Image (tube, rainbow, N blue to C red):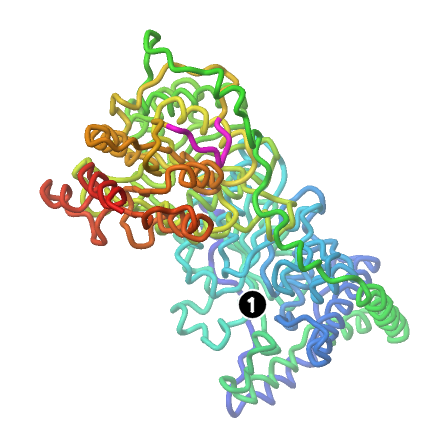
Amino acid sequence: MAKKASTTASKQRPPAPAPVKASKGNGTQAAKAASTDVFDVTGFDKATLLDWYKVQHLGRRLDEKAALYLKQAKGWSYHAPFAGHDGIQLALGKIFRPGKDYLFPYYRDMLTSLAAGVTVEEIIANGLSKDADVAGGGRHMSNHFAKISIGLQNSSSCTGNHSQQAVGTGRSIKKFSGDEIVYCSTGESTTSEGYYYEAVNGADREKLPVIFVLQNNKYGISVPLKDQTANELVAENFSGFKNLKIVYCDGRNPMDSWRALSEAKAYVETGAGPAMVHADCDRIGSHSNSDNHELYREPEDIQAMKDRDPLPKMRATLIANGVATAEELDAIEAANKAAIFAAADVVEVLPDPAPESYIDYLVPPAIVDYNDVSETRYVNDPTAPQLTFREGINTALIEEFRRNPATFLFGQDVASHKKQGIFNVCKGLLDEFGNDRVFNAPIAEDFIVGTANGMCRYRDDIRVVVEGAEFADYFWPAMEQLLECSHDYWRTRGQFSANMVVRLASGGYIQGGLYHSQNLEGTFTTLPGIRVVMPAFADDAIGLMRNAIRSRGVTMYLEPKFLYNYRPTSASMPPDDYIIPFGKARERRAGTNLTIVSWGTAVHLSLQAADIMANEGISCQVIDLRSLAPWDREMVLESVKRTGRCVVAHEDKKTGGFGGEVASTIGEELFRWLDAPVQRVGSKDTPVGFAKSLEKAILLSVEDIVGACRTASRF
């Protein structure tokens, strides 16, 4: 009972300090009253206070330097000033333990980053997008600071989506019994995003060591707080979370912010749950260099914020309390100015990123890039026990979980007693590896993918397999986090990759109708930085899963659900070294007159179509791509160059399907060798109907492929 009472008390409104409100008519009077105040420094020693002032002043002068670079057109083309957030940012950077904790900043966190351990040179190199930028060598927007070597994470520009990743990192800390803390810093407007609520809910439910820091400056660019939420104290929106401790503070005041963060940290370290620190701040400047806050703020309000400026107030505090003389602070300020000038001289002459380097760090190297030895040595033995497609995937998962104890599986319904997946693909994993490694997720696809990303940040050997959605059609909410994953490795210039496999049950032919019959590979292949595979046989399902789990990076592993128990997919168990390389196709049938290129369920339809064409005297080679990103251009082009005719067949709808890329490549590179236009056939450009008659009319059929083959053969 005592514990519950304590937690509840922590969520009450803060008694003080309340923000000074300025509006027409009383702005001058309120500002005058605020300007005479000083901070309470009780309990803080002189060395700490002088160090804090040095860092705070240095950050503010760097903020001014950024604006100057903009005016000089030298760089820092995106700049979001932090003035008015000084207290919470200084305290956050100082409570963070470099090389131990994890800190997910947002784009306004310059002072946070500086206090956390990013040097002046590194701050300027980021602002000028230099090759030496430790965040990612100029690949990300300026003012997006990171230093992964000390735990300061590289967050993207998608407002607050790093909250999901922070929670995932907290999950790994808990699973590996670590004592690190995760800090997730955002503005208050981030809380309007649904995925932020998903993140807080997940951290609360799992009692994770995460501290959410809300820097509330009352504006989302020009949108005032009242248009975001009914609560001026935004953290009150989260007061119903059972295990979340909420602490309020004056975000202008470093000492009060330190008090709040320390209280939050102490709570999180008990293991009782996450915490949230709500810091009341001012945004003294415009949102960014592309914004003019004078267009939507009253002059009196702007002046009142300037009169509450934390920097001169901190200086006055130190002098009033006898911590330092004006002359001593002048010396600190002069040293800061000299340090910035010296750093600028060093950084400005550094090289920009080499233009040709854009191709580097797109996808991490795979464990097996090419392995024709194991594949040619393995031949399916029809006399041996045969695995179905579903059993092949299941077998590979179990093998990999035994091989690497740092492998995890989670998603919807994967760890329910006796059920373990709606298609039984995960059957037995919970029984053998337990609920710590195989666990259910909320019905929140973005949360599943986003926290998987975060889990990988804790240790390099962690591999996460997620069932991204029970049916591929439900994956769309997770596209925001998948996009994030697709450029993590590139954006950090190889410093971080989300090492995860996203499994999706794809396609139709099961009378599923809307949301149960869709193919998404055409969408996934438009995202540089991820792999996309779709096996069609049990042995390939094993070989591709082995490569996907063991390799770094993100692999979309698409499972045509019609094939799960389809007997023609069956194969004997391949040897332990049978690993399918990404981007390596396989010939399923030899032929001389026409090439059929397909993948997934369409491979089996194509084989049936090839039988029909053989009876008509047309010999068709059937190529199973198996991997779409990358795809085996060499095998396809060699085949079509020899046959002179090609049909590309896939289950996805024709318009926008990946077959268009294959056909286009053939047309561009083999025009002189073609005896007929490349034929492309897929499902109809409509939603997939539920009634069997509609589904049959809409989805790709053997007859569709045969018709395309006949058309290509007539030329």
Q: Is residue 203 above or below residue 248?
A: above
Start and end of the magenta stretch? 580-587
Q: Residue furthest top?
A: 383
Q: Position of residue 556 (x, y in %)?
A: 43, 40
Residue 584 lies in the magenta-colored region: yes
The rendered magenta stretch, by its main secondary structure, is classed as loop
Residue found at x 54% / y 23%: 404
| Residue 80: % across, % down | 61, 71
- Residue 116 horizontal side relative to residue 239, left or right: right
* Residue that carries the numbered disc 1 in the rendered image: 280
Q: Secondary structure at mark 1?
A: strand
Residue 251 higher or lower than 563, as above or below: below
Q: How many numbered marks are there?
A: 1
On the picture, is 371 further left or further right than 446? right
The structure residue drawn at horizontal position 52% and vertical position 88%, both measured from the top left corner, is 298
Residue 2 makes an appearance in the image:
no
Q: Residue at x 30, y 32 (%)?
A: 620
**Three-letter code for the amino acid on which mark 1 is drawn:** Asp
Q: Quadrant of residue 642?
A: top left
Q: Is residue 423 above or below residue 640?
A: above
Whether residue 450 is visible, yes or no, is yes
Residue 316 rendering spot, x and y as whole percentages: 77, 75
Q: Specify whether residue 533 is painted magenta.
A: no
Position of the N terminus, as image quadrant, is top left
* Image x and y of residue 411, in percent: 38, 36
Classify residue 188 as left or right of residue 255: left
